[in-house]
Amino acid sequence: MLCLGIESTAHTFGVGIADEKGKVFSNVRSVYKPKIGGIHPTEAQAHHLEKACETISIACEQAKIKISDIDIFSFSAGPGIPKCLRVGAVACRMLSQKFSKPIIPVNHCIAHIEIGKISTGLADPVTLYVSGGNTQILAFAEGRYRVFGETQDIGVGNLLDQFGRTAGLPFPGGPEIERLALQGKKFIELPYVVKGMDVSFSGILTDCERKLKTEKLEDLCFSLQENVFAMLVETTERAMAHTEKNECLLTGGVAANKRLAEMLKIMCEERGAKFAVVPREYSGDCGAMIAWVGILEFLTQKKSDDFSARKNPSRIFITGKKYSLEQTKINRFWRSDDVEISWL
Ligand code: ATP
Ligand code: FE2
Protein backbone atom coordinates (compact mmCIF):
# COMPACT_ATOMS: atom_id res chain seq x y z
CA MET A 1 0.00 0.00 0.00
CA LEU A 2 1.38 3.39 -1.00
CA CYS A 3 0.43 6.78 0.38
CA LEU A 4 1.42 10.12 -1.15
CA GLY A 5 1.57 12.84 1.51
CA ILE A 6 1.59 16.57 0.89
CA GLU A 7 3.05 19.06 3.38
CA SER A 8 2.34 22.78 2.98
CA THR A 9 1.82 24.31 6.43
CA ALA A 10 4.40 27.10 6.07
CA HIS A 11 7.61 27.56 4.05
CA THR A 12 7.89 24.04 2.63
CA PHE A 13 5.90 22.41 -0.13
CA GLY A 14 6.85 18.78 0.42
CA VAL A 15 5.72 15.54 -1.17
CA GLY A 16 6.59 12.11 0.19
CA ILE A 17 5.63 8.56 -0.69
CA ALA A 18 5.63 5.82 1.97
CA ASP A 19 4.28 2.31 2.43
CA GLU A 20 2.61 0.50 5.33
CA LYS A 21 5.96 -0.64 6.77
CA GLY A 22 7.10 2.97 7.03
CA LYS A 23 9.51 2.64 4.12
CA VAL A 24 9.95 6.00 2.41
CA PHE A 25 10.35 5.86 -1.37
CA SER A 26 10.75 9.58 -1.95
CA ASN A 27 10.69 12.79 0.05
CA VAL A 28 10.94 15.90 -2.11
CA ARG A 29 10.87 19.50 -0.90
CA SER A 30 10.55 22.90 -2.45
CA VAL A 31 11.24 25.59 0.15
CA TYR A 32 10.07 29.20 -0.05
CA LYS A 33 12.79 31.59 1.11
CA PRO A 34 11.64 35.15 1.83
CA LYS A 35 13.86 37.87 0.37
CA ILE A 36 13.58 39.91 3.54
CA GLY A 37 11.98 39.24 6.91
CA GLY A 38 9.90 36.21 7.83
CA ILE A 39 7.33 34.20 5.90
CA HIS A 40 4.99 36.37 3.83
CA PRO A 41 1.80 34.26 3.49
CA THR A 42 0.81 35.46 0.01
CA GLU A 43 4.33 34.96 -1.35
CA ALA A 44 4.60 31.52 0.29
CA GLN A 45 1.25 30.57 -1.24
CA ALA A 46 2.40 31.76 -4.68
CA HIS A 47 5.55 29.66 -4.29
CA HIS A 48 3.55 26.56 -3.34
CA LEU A 49 1.11 27.06 -6.24
CA GLU A 50 3.97 27.37 -8.67
CA LYS A 51 5.87 24.34 -7.37
CA ALA A 52 3.02 21.94 -6.46
CA CYS A 53 2.71 19.94 -9.72
CA GLU A 54 6.45 19.78 -10.29
CA THR A 55 7.15 18.55 -6.74
CA ILE A 56 4.46 15.85 -6.99
CA SER A 57 5.92 14.67 -10.33
CA ILE A 58 9.49 14.55 -8.99
CA ALA A 59 8.35 12.57 -5.93
CA CYS A 60 6.71 9.97 -8.20
CA GLU A 61 9.74 9.84 -10.50
CA GLN A 62 12.14 9.34 -7.58
CA ALA A 63 9.92 6.59 -6.14
CA LYS A 64 9.76 5.07 -9.64
CA ILE A 65 5.99 4.85 -9.60
CA LYS A 66 3.09 6.30 -11.56
CA ILE A 67 0.70 8.53 -9.65
CA SER A 68 -2.09 6.09 -10.52
CA ASP A 69 -0.22 3.47 -8.38
CA ILE A 70 -0.92 5.50 -5.23
CA ASP A 71 -3.55 3.96 -2.91
CA ILE A 72 -4.14 6.88 -0.51
CA PHE A 73 -3.53 10.62 -0.59
CA SER A 74 -2.89 12.60 2.59
CA PHE A 75 -2.14 16.23 3.39
CA SER A 76 -1.25 18.49 6.32
CA ALA A 77 -4.57 20.01 7.37
CA GLY A 78 -3.11 22.13 10.21
CA PRO A 79 -1.87 23.84 12.24
CA GLY A 80 -0.29 26.34 9.91
CA ILE A 81 -0.70 29.37 7.70
CA PRO A 82 -4.14 29.17 6.02
CA LYS A 83 -2.98 30.41 2.62
CA CYS A 84 -0.26 27.76 2.56
CA LEU A 85 -2.44 24.98 3.96
CA ARG A 86 -5.03 25.54 1.23
CA VAL A 87 -2.58 24.75 -1.55
CA GLY A 88 -1.82 21.29 -0.17
CA ALA A 89 -5.47 20.64 0.65
CA VAL A 90 -6.71 21.56 -2.83
CA ALA A 91 -3.97 19.57 -4.57
CA CYS A 92 -4.77 16.54 -2.42
CA ARG A 93 -8.53 16.76 -2.96
CA MET A 94 -8.02 16.94 -6.71
CA LEU A 95 -5.73 13.89 -6.74
CA SER A 96 -8.07 11.94 -4.50
CA GLN A 97 -11.05 12.68 -6.73
CA LYS A 98 -9.27 12.17 -10.03
CA PHE A 99 -7.94 8.75 -9.02
CA SER A 100 -10.93 7.82 -6.81
CA LYS A 101 -8.70 7.10 -3.83
CA PRO A 102 -9.18 7.90 -0.12
CA ILE A 103 -8.07 11.22 1.27
CA ILE A 104 -6.70 11.62 4.81
CA PRO A 105 -6.20 14.99 6.55
CA VAL A 106 -3.17 14.80 8.85
CA ASN A 107 -2.17 16.84 11.90
CA HIS A 108 1.28 18.30 11.21
CA CYS A 109 2.54 18.02 14.82
CA ILE A 110 1.48 14.37 15.13
CA ALA A 111 3.34 13.74 11.86
CA HIS A 112 6.57 15.16 13.36
CA ILE A 113 6.18 12.69 16.27
CA GLU A 114 5.30 9.63 14.20
CA ILE A 115 8.10 10.09 11.64
CA GLY A 116 10.44 10.42 14.63
CA LYS A 117 9.20 7.15 16.12
CA ILE A 118 9.32 5.08 12.94
CA SER A 119 12.75 6.39 11.94
CA THR A 120 14.35 5.87 15.38
CA GLY A 121 12.54 2.76 16.58
CA LEU A 122 11.33 4.38 19.82
CA ALA A 123 7.98 2.95 20.86
CA ASP A 124 6.51 5.14 23.58
CA PRO A 125 8.67 8.23 24.11
CA VAL A 126 8.25 11.56 25.78
CA THR A 127 8.65 13.78 22.72
CA LEU A 128 10.26 17.19 22.64
CA TYR A 129 8.81 18.71 19.48
CA VAL A 130 10.65 21.89 18.62
CA SER A 131 10.15 23.86 15.42
CA GLY A 132 9.55 27.38 14.20
CA GLY A 133 5.93 27.69 15.25
CA ASN A 134 5.76 25.01 17.92
CA THR A 135 7.45 23.96 21.14
CA GLN A 136 5.72 21.14 22.98
CA ILE A 137 6.50 18.24 25.27
CA LEU A 138 4.13 15.41 24.48
CA ALA A 139 3.51 11.84 25.54
CA PHE A 140 0.86 9.31 24.64
CA ALA A 141 -1.76 8.62 27.29
CA GLU A 142 -5.29 7.28 26.96
CA GLY A 143 -5.88 7.64 23.26
CA ARG A 144 -4.11 10.94 22.61
CA TYR A 145 -0.77 12.63 22.57
CA ARG A 146 -1.12 14.78 25.67
CA VAL A 147 0.72 18.06 25.95
CA PHE A 148 2.67 18.07 29.22
CA GLY A 149 4.41 21.35 28.59
CA GLU A 150 4.58 23.97 25.88
CA THR A 151 5.64 27.48 25.07
CA GLN A 152 3.39 30.19 26.38
CA ASP A 153 4.28 32.46 23.47
CA ILE A 154 6.55 31.88 20.46
CA GLY A 155 8.16 28.62 19.32
CA VAL A 156 11.88 28.16 20.02
CA GLY A 157 12.61 28.17 16.26
CA ASN A 158 10.85 31.53 15.95
CA LEU A 159 12.97 32.85 18.81
CA LEU A 160 16.12 31.81 16.95
CA ASP A 161 14.85 33.07 13.58
CA GLN A 162 13.74 36.44 14.97
CA PHE A 163 16.96 36.97 16.88
CA GLY A 164 18.86 36.00 13.73
CA ARG A 165 16.91 38.54 11.70
CA THR A 166 17.63 41.35 14.18
CA ALA A 167 21.31 40.38 14.15
CA GLY A 168 21.33 40.50 10.33
CA LEU A 169 21.74 36.73 9.83
CA PRO A 170 20.12 34.94 6.88
CA PHE A 171 16.77 33.13 7.30
CA PRO A 172 16.34 30.68 8.95
CA GLY A 173 18.44 31.85 11.88
CA GLY A 174 18.60 28.49 13.72
CA PRO A 175 21.47 26.89 11.76
CA GLU A 176 23.46 30.17 11.66
CA ILE A 177 23.13 30.62 15.42
CA GLU A 178 24.29 27.03 15.93
CA ARG A 179 27.38 27.73 13.81
CA LEU A 180 28.22 31.03 15.56
CA ALA A 181 27.60 29.54 19.02
CA LEU A 182 30.59 27.24 18.51
CA GLN A 183 32.81 30.32 18.50
CA GLY A 184 31.22 31.84 21.63
CA LYS A 185 33.32 31.85 24.79
CA LYS A 186 31.56 33.98 27.38
CA PHE A 187 28.29 32.97 29.01
CA ILE A 188 25.96 35.97 29.22
CA GLU A 189 23.20 35.80 31.79
CA LEU A 190 19.71 35.77 30.17
CA PRO A 191 16.22 35.29 31.63
CA TYR A 192 15.44 31.63 32.37
CA VAL A 193 11.68 31.28 32.10
CA VAL A 194 10.22 27.94 33.17
CA LYS A 195 6.73 27.84 34.67
CA GLY A 196 5.88 24.31 35.79
CA MET A 197 6.36 22.36 32.59
CA ASP A 198 5.78 25.38 30.33
CA VAL A 199 8.38 27.73 28.92
CA SER A 200 8.30 31.27 27.56
CA PHE A 201 10.70 32.81 25.05
CA SER A 202 9.56 36.31 24.11
CA GLY A 203 11.23 38.04 27.09
CA ILE A 204 14.49 36.25 26.29
CA LEU A 205 14.26 37.44 22.69
CA THR A 206 13.84 41.08 23.77
CA ASP A 207 16.74 40.85 26.23
CA CYS A 208 19.00 39.16 23.69
CA GLU A 209 18.19 41.76 21.02
CA ARG A 210 18.98 44.54 23.46
CA LYS A 211 22.32 42.96 24.35
CA LEU A 212 23.36 42.97 20.68
CA LYS A 213 24.48 46.57 21.28
CA THR A 214 26.99 45.62 23.96
CA GLU A 215 27.93 41.95 23.54
CA LYS A 216 29.67 39.91 20.87
CA LEU A 217 27.25 38.08 18.56
CA GLU A 218 29.07 34.74 18.98
CA ASP A 219 28.81 34.96 22.79
CA LEU A 220 25.12 35.83 22.55
CA CYS A 221 24.42 32.89 20.21
CA PHE A 222 26.26 30.55 22.59
CA SER A 223 24.43 31.88 25.66
CA LEU A 224 21.05 31.89 23.95
CA GLN A 225 21.41 28.23 22.99
CA GLU A 226 22.72 27.12 26.39
CA ASN A 227 19.98 29.01 28.18
CA VAL A 228 16.90 28.01 26.18
CA PHE A 229 18.04 24.45 25.60
CA ALA A 230 18.53 24.03 29.36
CA MET A 231 14.92 25.19 29.81
CA LEU A 232 13.77 22.55 27.30
CA VAL A 233 15.85 19.78 28.87
CA GLU A 234 14.56 20.64 32.35
CA THR A 235 10.90 20.50 31.30
CA THR A 236 11.37 17.35 29.22
CA GLU A 237 13.01 15.63 32.17
CA ARG A 238 10.12 16.64 34.41
CA ALA A 239 7.64 15.13 31.92
CA MET A 240 9.67 11.90 31.85
CA ALA A 241 9.65 11.70 35.64
CA HIS A 242 5.92 12.43 35.74
CA THR A 243 4.91 9.89 33.08
CA GLU A 244 7.54 7.32 34.16
CA LYS A 245 8.46 6.79 30.52
CA ASN A 246 12.02 5.80 29.76
CA GLU A 247 12.36 6.96 26.16
CA CYS A 248 12.88 10.47 24.85
CA LEU A 249 12.47 11.62 21.24
CA LEU A 250 13.69 14.91 19.81
CA THR A 251 11.79 15.95 16.67
CA GLY A 252 10.84 19.02 14.57
CA GLY A 253 13.02 21.48 12.65
CA VAL A 254 15.14 22.51 15.67
CA ALA A 255 16.01 18.82 16.23
CA ALA A 256 18.74 19.41 13.64
CA ASN A 257 20.65 21.27 16.38
CA LYS A 258 23.56 19.14 17.65
CA ARG A 259 23.94 20.94 20.96
CA LEU A 260 20.29 20.45 21.91
CA ALA A 261 20.59 16.74 21.06
CA GLU A 262 23.77 16.47 23.12
CA MET A 263 22.17 18.07 26.19
CA LEU A 264 19.11 15.79 26.01
CA LYS A 265 21.36 12.76 25.55
CA ILE A 266 23.26 13.58 28.74
CA MET A 267 20.01 14.01 30.68
CA CYS A 268 18.71 10.65 29.39
CA GLU A 269 21.97 8.85 30.16
CA GLU A 270 21.78 10.12 33.72
CA ARG A 271 18.24 8.74 34.03
CA GLY A 272 19.08 5.45 32.32
CA ALA A 273 16.59 6.29 29.55
CA LYS A 274 16.85 5.79 25.79
CA PHE A 275 17.30 8.88 23.67
CA ALA A 276 16.96 9.32 19.92
CA VAL A 277 16.80 12.22 17.53
CA VAL A 278 14.90 12.20 14.26
CA PRO A 279 17.28 11.86 11.29
CA ARG A 280 18.12 15.12 9.57
CA GLU A 281 16.13 14.35 6.40
CA TYR A 282 12.93 14.13 8.46
CA SER A 283 13.54 16.82 11.09
CA GLY A 284 12.11 19.70 9.08
CA ASP A 285 8.71 19.82 7.42
CA CYS A 286 8.40 17.11 4.81
CA GLY A 287 5.89 15.08 2.83
CA ALA A 288 7.18 11.70 4.08
CA MET A 289 5.87 12.34 7.59
CA ILE A 290 2.42 13.21 6.21
CA ALA A 291 2.40 10.09 4.01
CA TRP A 292 3.30 7.87 6.97
CA VAL A 293 0.52 9.22 9.19
CA GLY A 294 -1.88 8.92 6.23
CA ILE A 295 -1.10 5.19 6.19
CA LEU A 296 -1.34 4.80 9.98
CA GLU A 297 -4.69 6.52 10.07
CA PHE A 298 -6.08 4.76 7.01
CA LEU A 299 -5.20 1.31 8.29
CA THR A 300 -6.89 1.86 11.61
CA GLN A 301 -9.98 3.82 10.62
CA LYS A 302 -12.14 1.18 9.05
CA LYS A 303 -14.31 0.42 12.06
CA SER A 304 -15.21 3.97 12.85
CA ASP A 305 -15.78 4.52 9.13
CA ASP A 306 -18.50 1.95 8.97
CA PHE A 307 -20.04 3.20 12.17
CA SER A 308 -20.20 6.84 11.12
CA ALA A 309 -21.44 5.90 7.65
CA ARG A 310 -24.32 3.99 9.21
CA LYS A 311 -25.12 6.87 11.50
CA ASN A 312 -25.12 9.40 8.69
CA PRO A 313 -25.60 7.77 5.30
CA SER A 314 -26.10 11.12 3.56
CA ARG A 315 -22.40 11.97 3.88
CA ILE A 316 -20.66 12.37 0.56
CA PHE A 317 -17.81 9.87 0.57
CA ILE A 318 -15.15 10.34 -2.02
CA THR A 319 -14.19 6.71 -2.04
CA GLY A 320 -16.41 4.99 0.47
CA LYS A 321 -13.77 5.65 3.16
CA LYS A 322 -13.89 7.91 6.13
CA TYR A 323 -13.41 11.48 5.10
CA SER A 324 -16.02 13.45 3.19
CA LEU A 325 -14.90 16.54 1.29
CA GLU A 326 -16.49 18.60 4.05
CA GLN A 327 -14.16 16.90 6.55
CA THR A 328 -11.05 17.86 4.63
CA LYS A 329 -11.24 21.50 5.65
CA ILE A 330 -8.02 22.98 6.91
CA ASN A 331 -7.74 23.93 10.59
CA ARG A 332 -5.10 26.57 11.23
CA PHE A 333 -5.22 26.07 15.00
CA TRP A 334 -5.52 22.26 15.05
CA ARG A 335 -3.94 21.16 18.33
CA SER A 336 -2.08 17.88 18.66
CA ASP A 337 -4.07 16.93 21.77
CA ASP A 338 -7.34 17.27 19.81
CA VAL A 339 -6.43 14.29 17.64
CA GLU A 340 -7.74 10.85 18.64
CA ILE A 341 -4.98 8.42 17.83
CA SER A 342 -6.58 5.35 16.29
CA TRP A 343 -3.35 3.39 15.69
CA LEU A 344 -2.05 3.16 19.25
P1 ATP B 1 6.02 23.82 12.51
O1 ATP B 1 4.79 24.05 11.72
O2 ATP B 1 6.15 22.40 12.99
O3 ATP B 1 6.24 24.83 13.56
P2 ATP B 1 8.07 24.99 10.89
O4 ATP B 1 7.28 25.70 9.89
O5 ATP B 1 8.73 25.76 11.92
O6 ATP B 1 7.21 23.81 11.46
P3 ATP B 1 10.26 23.12 10.56
O7 ATP B 1 10.96 22.76 9.28
O8 ATP B 1 9.65 22.04 11.36
O9 ATP B 1 9.20 24.18 10.09
O10 ATP B 1 11.28 23.95 11.48
C1 ATP B 1 11.97 25.08 11.03
C2 ATP B 1 12.74 25.69 12.19
O11 ATP B 1 13.87 24.87 12.52
C3 ATP B 1 13.27 27.09 11.93
O12 ATP B 1 12.89 27.91 12.99
C4 ATP B 1 14.79 26.89 11.90
O13 ATP B 1 15.53 27.99 12.37
C5 ATP B 1 14.95 25.71 12.83
N1 ATP B 1 16.22 25.02 12.59
C6 ATP B 1 16.63 24.35 11.50
N2 ATP B 1 17.90 23.90 11.66
C7 ATP B 1 18.30 24.28 12.91
C8 ATP B 1 19.50 24.14 13.68
N3 ATP B 1 20.54 23.50 13.21
N4 ATP B 1 19.52 24.67 14.92
C9 ATP B 1 18.45 25.32 15.43
N5 ATP B 1 17.32 25.50 14.75
C10 ATP B 1 17.22 25.00 13.51
FE1 FE2 C 1 6.96 21.59 11.20
Image: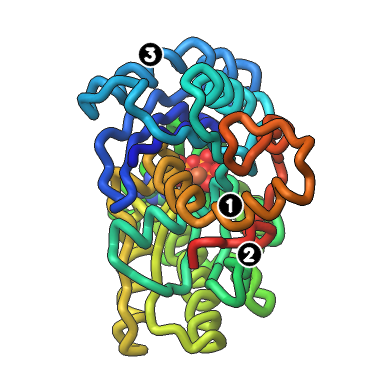
When the figure is inspected, residue 234 is found, relative to residue 180, above or below; the finding is below
Dot 1 alpha-carbon crowd within 10 angstroms: few under 14, some 14 to 19, many 20 or more: many
| Residue nearest the observer in this picture, 325 or 289 | 325
Helix, strand or loop for disc 1? loop
Helix, strand or loop for disc 2? strand
For label 2, being within 8 Å of ligand 1 is answered: no
Question: Which picture quadrant has residue 91?
Answer: top right
Identify the residue under disc 2: 150
Task: Look at label 1 and name its amino acid.
Answer: Asn
| Residue nearest the observer in this picture, 167 or 19 | 19
Q: Measure the alpha-carbon separation of dots 2 and 1.
A: 8 Å
When the figure is inspected, residue 192 is found, relative to residue 338, above or below; the finding is below
For label 1, being within 8 Å of ligand 1 is answered: yes
Percent of width and height locating residue 118: 33, 58
Q: Measure the alpha-carbon separation of dots 3 and 2.
A: 36 Å
Dot 2 alpha-carbon crowd within 10 angstroms: few under 14, some 14 to 19, many 20 or more: many
User: On residue 80, which mark appears?
Assistant: none
Helix, strand or loop for disc 3? helix
| Residue nearest the observer in this picture, 224 or 250 | 250
In the image, what residue occupies the spot 46% across and 17% down?
Answer: 52
Q: Measure the alpha-carbon separation of dots 1 and 3.
A: 29 Å
Identify the residue under disc 1: 134
Percent of width and height locating residue 129: 49, 59
User: On residue 54, which mark appears?
Assistant: 3
Task: Look at label 2 and name its amino acid.
Answer: Glu
Proximity of marks 2 and 1: CB atoms separated by less than 8 Å: yes
Residue 227 relative to residue 144: left or right: left
Query: Comparing marks 1 and 3, which lies closer to the viewer?
Result: 3
| Residue nearest the observer in this picture, 116 or 42 | 116
In the image, what residue occupies the spot 42% across and 41% down?
Answer: 291
